[in-house]
C-alpha cells in the first residue's frame, strides 16, 4: 500500500486523517471489504507497535480512531476522535492476514509507517496593560498558552532607583 503521510514524515498537522491506498480491490477472507472494517488497522502512540495502542471506536478524544474503506478508490482512511498530541510520534499498522486481493493473495506480515506531529506553538502575547506615565506600578501581560517550557521574560528597575536593570522570568 501507499501510506499518507509517508514513513518517518515529520511536522504533520494534528487533525491528520492518514490513508492507505492499494492498487487493486480488497477483500476480507470471504467477502468484499466493508465500508467500516474493524481490526484491520491498528494505531500506536510511539515509534512502532510496542508503543501505547490507541482504541478503535468512535469516541471524541485523541486516543480513539475509526477506519473507513472507500472501495472505489481502494483506500482506507483513519480518522481520530480529536486532534492528536503535539510533537508526538504515531505508528499506523496494517495487520497481517486481514486483507486479500481478488486472487485471494494476502498481506502475510504486518506493515506500517511512523509519523510525527507538529511541535506546539510558542506562547503569543495577546495584550498588556500598564498605568500610563508611571514609572513604578504593575504591568499585566496576557498570553495564549504554548509550548510547555515557554517563558515570559521582563525587565524592571528596583524601587531603590538603582541604574541597573533587573531581569526575571515567569514560566
Image (cartoon, rainbow, N blue to C red):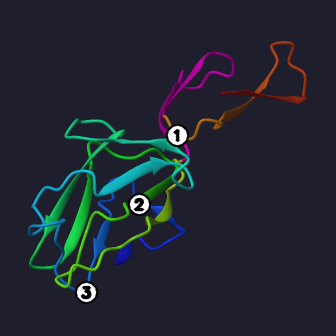
Which label was assigned to residue 93?
A: 2
Residue 8 or residue 140, whichever sits in front: 8
Q: Position of residue 79 (x, y in %)?
A: 25, 53
Residue 105 located left or right of residue 68? right
Sequence-first disc among 2 and 1: 2
Span highlighted in magenta in the image? 122-144
Drawn side of residue 2 relative to residue 117, left or right: left
Q: Secondary structure at mark 1?
A: loop
Q: Position of residue 52 (x, y in %)?
A: 49, 40
- Quarter of the image containing the N terminus? bottom left
Label 3, label 2: how far apart the Cα atoms are: 18 Å
The residue lying toward the viewer, choosing from 171 and 56, is 56
Residue at left offset 29%, top offset 42%: 82
Real-space CA distance between mark 1 and mark 3, rounded to the nearest whole angstrom? 42 Å
Q: Which mark is residue 86?
A: none
Mark 3 or mark 2: which comes first in sequence? Answer: 3
Q: Is residue 149 left or right of residue 60?
A: right
> For the residue labelled by badge 3, is the local secondary structure a helix, a strand or a loop?
loop
Q: Residue at x 40, y 59 (%)?
A: 13
Evaluate if marks 1 and 3 touch, with contact meaning CB atoms under 8 Å apart: no
Mark carried by residue 23: 3
Q: Which mark is residue 146?
A: 1
Amino acid at each position: 500500500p501507499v501510506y499518507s503521510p509517508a514513513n518517518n514524515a515529520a511536522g504533520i498537522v494534528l487533525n491528520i486523517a492518514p490513508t492507505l491506498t492499494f492498487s487493486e480491490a480488497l477483500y476480507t477472507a470471504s467477502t468484499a471489504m466493508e465500508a467500516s472494517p474493524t481490526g484491520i488497522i491498528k494505531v500506536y502512540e510511539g515509534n512502532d507497535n510496542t508503543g501505547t495502542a490507541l482504541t478503535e471506536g468512535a469516541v471524541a478524544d485523541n486516543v480513539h480512531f475509526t477506519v473507513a474503506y472507500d472501495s472505489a478508490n481502494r483506500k482506507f482512511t483513519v480518522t481520530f476522535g480529536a486532534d492528536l498530541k503535539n510533537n508526538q510520534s504515531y505508528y499506523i499498522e496494517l495487520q497481517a492476514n486481514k486483507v486479500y486481493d481478488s486472487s485471494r493473495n494476502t498481506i502475510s506480515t504486518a506493515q506500517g509507517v511512523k509519523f510525527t506531529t507538529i511541535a506546539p506553538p510558542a506562547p503569543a502575547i495577546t495584550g498588556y496593560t500598564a498605568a500610563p506615565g508611571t514609572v513604578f506600578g504593575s504591568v499585566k501581560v496576557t498570553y495564549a498558552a504554548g509550548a510547555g517550557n515557554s517563558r515570559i521574560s521582563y525587565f524592571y528597575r528596583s524601587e531603590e532607583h538603582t541604574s541597573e536593570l533587573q531581569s526575571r522570568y515567569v514560566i
